Image: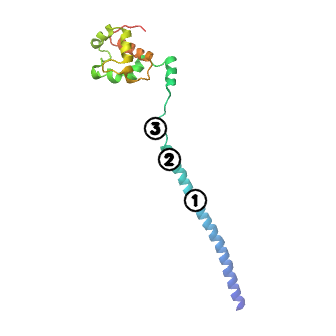
Amino acid sequence: MKSDNNKNVLFELLSLIIGSILGGILFILFINYDFNRKTDTNVMVESKISENIQPVAKVELAAASLESSVSGGKSGEEIYKAVCASCHQAGVLNAPKLGDTQAWAPRISQGYELLVQHAVKGIRSMPAKGGNVSLLDAEVASAVLYMSNSSGANFKK
């Protein structure tokens, strides 16, 4: 009987040791799985945060626009569409509309140089350089040439 009792104790002890080892391994695997899952989530959260804090816009320095102007730059039509059209397309605040020869006639009779001077410095309701102070005087002159020639003038550059 005593030997059966010893065998039972030995069996119980071995079962307890093996069970503890297997339980420990399973516990370690569970923790490792849980941490890996949290790490993946953290990576996703960090990438989403990084994506969300990207700048809305990028700033280009004025020197870049100066270089493009020197190497050909924008045409008078491009300047007109980008800056002048906001007022001269609809006639905002009595701005002469592009192509309206009657409205442009008195202005054209003043001469190209005076038109350019008014456009660069501003006149009446029109701000200097049409409100875009980053334009070069040559770009404004190009836009004036385009607008006045499209409205009945025959100015040469």
User: Helix, strand or loop at disc 2?
Assistant: helix
Distance from Cα at disc 1 to Cα at disc 3: 35 Å
Please tell me which residue lies in front, 21 or 58.
58
What type is the residue that disc 1 sits on? Phe
Q: Is residue 43 left or right of residue 75?
A: right
Q: Which residue is mark 3?
A: 56
Decide which of tag 2 and tag 1 comes sooner along the chain: 1
The residue lying at 41 percent from left, 20 percent from top is 79
**What residue did someone put label 2 on?**
49
Crowd tier of the residue under label 2, counting other residues whose Cα lies within 10 Å: few below 14, some 14–19, many 20 or above: few
Question: In the structure shown, which secondary structural element does the residue marked by tag 3 occupy?
Answer: loop
- Say which amino acid is labelled 3: Val
> Residue 49: where, in percent of width, then height?
50, 47
Question: Residue 40 appears at what percent x and percent y?
Answer: 55, 53
Where does label 1 land, which residue?
35
Q: Residue 63: x, y in percent?
A: 51, 24
Q: CA distance from mark 2 to mark 1?
A: 20 Å
